[in-house]
Image (tube, helix red, strand yellow):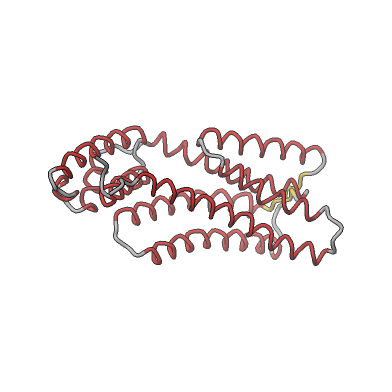
Amino acid sequence: MQLSKKSEDFLGNLRIYLISSGKNEKEVDEIVGELEDHLVQAEKRGKSVEDVTGLTPNQYMGQISDEMPIDHKSIFKYIVMVLLGALSFILLGDALKGDLEYSLFVLIGYPLVMIGFLFCTAALLKYVSSHQISKRREWTFYYILGGVPTLIFIGLLLLSQVMEVPTLAFGGSWRIFALILAISVILGVSIWSKTWILFILAILLNVPEMVIQHSSFSEKTKLILTGIAIPLFVGGYFVFLFMREKKKEKQSRPVM
């Protein structure tokens, strides 16, 4: 017997809540697995999630989280890996364009913004997984989460142009080194995370632009084509991921 969608959603939200609270992933999987077995048996007897936990989903998640220690080692590992992946993503694009010039604002601000983004993401996932909110409100939160760092990055770049600050510029053999380093780190993070999303996005964001920039079109046409191609390819990829997950979800549901 398979679980009802309500129970599956609860287990998925519980896992997200605990991991975003800094708990050990292996211990989280063990707890979720044990609870899943209890829910299967409970649903056979016509009982719900609340009957098994004795609490509301929000209360139960908070109780389990309080009983588990924070895995500082895993938190540090995730921060380092995500930070390296994000910075390598930026470095790859700059190296391909030959624009390896960074102000002090950028060198200090980018890592700080990314670390802040990680903690805000964890807090948002924790909130969304433990509260009943509409999909519109949920996506609004995600848009804000993604938009604020982007605006800060743009602000740092503009600030670097307005104010005179120390700047580091790299060229020549440094560009080759930066390319090799960025690709190596992106590959390493992809292998470590067991997903090729970051690697594929790096290709979709950079290859179309490179092809267009090396074409014989006018600069205005190149700019227009780049503005169309990148959102089209990246958006298409995310639609593909979404459709694939929906297909998996549909196949995993029991046939009535």
Q: Image quadrant for the N terminus?
A: top left
Q: Is residue 13 above or below residue 138?
A: above
Q: Is residue 28 above or below residue 63?
A: above
Of residues 234 and 145, the one drawn nearer to the viewer in this rendering? 234
Where does the image place residue 137, in percent across and percent down from the top left? 39, 66
Q: Quadrant of residue 223?
A: bottom right
Apparent side of residue 164 relative to residue 2 in the rendered image (left or right): right
Apparent side of residue 2 relative to residue 163 in the rendered image (left or right): left
Apparent side of residue 217 relative to residue 64 in the rendered image (left or right): right
Apparent side of residue 211 relative to residue 24 in the rendered image (left or right): right
Q: Residue at x 65, y 34 (%)?
A: 184
Q: Residue at x 76, y 51 (%)?
A: 210
Where does the image place residue 230, in percent across and percent down from the top left? 66, 57
Q: Residue at x 45, y 38 (%)?
A: 76
Where does the image place residue 103, in percent across and percent down from the top left? 69, 53
Residue at the limit of the structure toward the right, as seen here? 216
How many dots with numbers? 0
Q: Quadrant of residue 219?
A: bottom right
Q: Residue at x 32, y 63 (%)?
A: 133
